């Protein structure tokens, strides 16, 4: 289970670096937030900062669910990993129907992988 959680944390780390680049003005906006901007406007950059914080929390939940850490209450982790499974499954759908082809091609598989990671940890 720790290997599964590590894969999820690695994916979240890549997403966090990607979001940092977007906040810094990288022209990769076609891959995020609906893909309507090449460079994100301020409101979306704020959203990217919030996402980075969220990724850190999700990473901690994944590690706790795999018993690699023991920081969060067990009941919280049990519920959270199930909620995250649904959240990332919804992300698969949202990315799959994005108007942005680059977002569909890149982020849909990432969301699938994170859904599988969460599902494996939830069932484990």
Image (cartoon, rainbow, N blue to C red):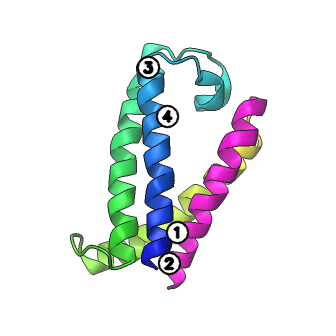
Q: Which residue is mark 2?
A: 122
Which badge, 4 or 2, is on the more N-terminal residue? 4
Q: Which residue is mark 1?
A: 118
- The residue furthest bottom is 124
Which numbered dot is residue 20? none
Q: CA distance from mark 1 to mark 2?
A: 6 Å
Instruction: Name the mark nearer the viewer: 1 or 3.
Output: 1
In the image, taking residue 75 as reference, residue 36 lies left or right, namely right
Residue 77, relative to residue 39: is it above or below?
below
Q: Residues within 10 Å of mark 4 (few under 14, many from 20)?
A: some
CB within 8 Å, label 1 to label 2: yes
What secondary structure is the stretch in magenta mostly built from? helix
SS label for mark 4: helix
SS label for mark 2: helix
Which numbered dot is residue 43? 3
Q: Please report the bounds of the magenta region as a residue range.
A: 99-124
Q: CA distance from mark 4 to mark 1?
A: 21 Å
Q: Which image quarter: residue 52?
A: top left
Residue at the spot 50% in from the left edge and 85% down from the top edge: 124
Q: CA distance from mark 3 to mark 2?
A: 34 Å
Which numbered dot is residue 18? 4
SS label for mark 1: helix
Q: Position of residue 36 (x, y in %)?
A: 66, 20
Residue 67, relative to residue 95: is it above or below?
below
Which badge, 4 or 1, is on the more N-terminal residue? 4
In the image, taking residue 2 as reference, residue 35 lies left or right, namely right
Which badge, 3 or 4, is on the more N-terminal residue? 4
Along the line of sight, the residue nearer the viewer: 7 or 79? 7
- The residue furthest left is 71
Residue at the spot 39% in from the left edge and 57% down from the top edge: 58
Residue 60, relative to residue 107: is it above or below?
below
């Amino acid at each position: 289970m720790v290997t599964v959680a590590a894969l999820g944390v690695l994916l979240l780390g890549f997403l966090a670096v990607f979001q940092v680049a977007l906040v810094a003005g990288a022209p990769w906006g076609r891959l995020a937030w609906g893909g309507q901007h090449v460079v994100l406007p301020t409101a979306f950059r704020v959203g990217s900062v919030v996402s980075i914080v969220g990724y850190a929390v999700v990473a901690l939940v994944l590690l706790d669910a795999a018993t690699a850490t023991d920081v969060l209450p067990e009941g919280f982790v049990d519920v959270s990993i199930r909620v995250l499974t649904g959240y990332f499954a919804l992300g698969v759908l949202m990315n799959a129907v994005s108007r942005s082809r680059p977002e569909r091609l890149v982020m849909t598989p990432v969301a699938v992988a994170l859904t599988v990671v969460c599902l494996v940890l939830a069932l484990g």
